[in-house]
Amino acid sequence: MGNYTVFVPRLITKKEYFVPGHRACIGCGEALAVRLAAKAMGQNTIVVNATGCIEIIASQIPYTSWKVPWIHTLFENTASVASGIEAGIKAMVRKELREEKGTKVVAIAGDGGTADIGLQALSGAMERGHDFLYLCFDNEAYMNTGIQRSSATPYGASTTTSPAGKASIGQFSWKKDMPAIAAAHDIPYVATACPSYPFDLMTKVKKGLETDGPAYIHILSVCPTGWRCAADLTIRIGRLAVKTGIFPLYEIENGAYKMNIDFPNLKPVTDYMQLQGRFKHLTPEIIEQIQQKVTEKYEELRQKSVVGSAE
């Protein structure tokens, strides 16, 4: 599925660093994505977690699902706290107050805490060149607080603050391209991932951790509750997001684009959208407009990429 090295099953640890007992909704794609990412992170990691679904479901005092050092911080300053920890570790090593143990710092947040509220802190941390990995778990709305739209909500989707109606198609703007914004900072590693492709996701997390400098991975996380889809369709819908071209899997290493999976013949966007209640109000004309946009963006990505093989 591309011409780079991926994890194979026998090399994946059986140890869990994000463990059962959390209170995620049934079928939560984000909880699955975090579990896979944590396997790739390993024990020698400090996690900084913004307010959001994962923080709420996994840290109810006095319990936690995290088996690594974990810090909860506010929506807006995840990257600031992560960069402070990274700088602090370097200072302690330099002053011989701590041995160099190769500890990795990982910041995690949802799309709201990344593309909206936390964008200023993230931009600053990337511009300063801090050595940390930032994971955006994108379920395309503020799901934890009631399914409000974010700038990552797809065009036409109905949410509680972009409701479909006689005078509204739902979300009025196109999804913000956060990987492109990260790449514009000239950081060494940017990638997209989805837990429906687990080995690809874990490989990219591992590469991000090994990167010298800032690394950013944007992870699509299917939300049955907010997307109004059946809980047993999480993996299928994630795969369809990739196969329709709505969420391509690619990486940008030192400015060079590479598509990890390419489908010469994309599936129609209706295959993806018809499984979700948030799109059920859309007319054929609006769906065709979305199809044209997806096809256009996919071709643009393909043109600037080294293309891997399809499944």
Image (spheres, rainbow, N blue to C red):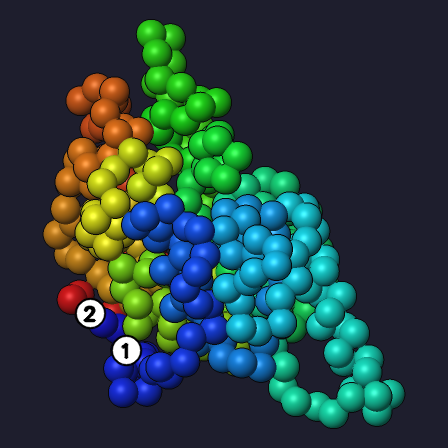
Residue 308 pos. (x, y %): 25, 69
Q: Quadrant of the C terminus?
A: bottom left
Residue 47 pos. (x, y %): 60, 67
Residue that badge 1 annotates:
3
Query: Which of disc 1 and disc 2 is earlier in sequence?
Result: 1
Name the residue at 51% across, 56% down. Answer: 58
Is residue 262 toward the left or the right of residue 54 in the image?
A: left
Q: Quadrant of residue 196?
A: bottom left
Instruction: Report the residue that reaches farthest toward the top.
Output: 166
Name the residue at 82% across, 80% down. Answer: 91
**Of the numbered discs in the image, which one, if any, rests on residue 260?**
none
Res 283 visible: yes
Q: Secondary structure at mark 2?
A: loop
Residue type of the residue flagged with mark 2: Ser
Comparing 256 with 120, the one in front is 120
Residue type of the residue flagged with mark 1: Asn
Instruction: Give the vertical position of 1 relative to 223 (above or below).
Output: below
Residue 178 pos. (x, y %): 50, 49
Total labels: the figure holds 2
Instruction: Report the residue that reaches farthest toward the front.
Output: 62
Is residue 27 toward the left or the right of residue 96 in the image?
A: left
Instruction: Give the vertical position of 305 relative to 42 (above or below).
Output: above
Residue 264 pos. (x, y %): 15, 56
Rounded to the nearest whole Å, what is the CA distance between mark 2 and mark 1?
Answer: 8 Å
Whether label 2 touches label 1, CB < 8 Å: yes
How dense is the environment of label 2, judged by Cα within 10 Å: few (below 14), some, or many (20 and up)?
few
Comparing 114 with 177, the one in front is 114
**Of the numbered discs in the image, which one, if any, rests on residue 309?**
2
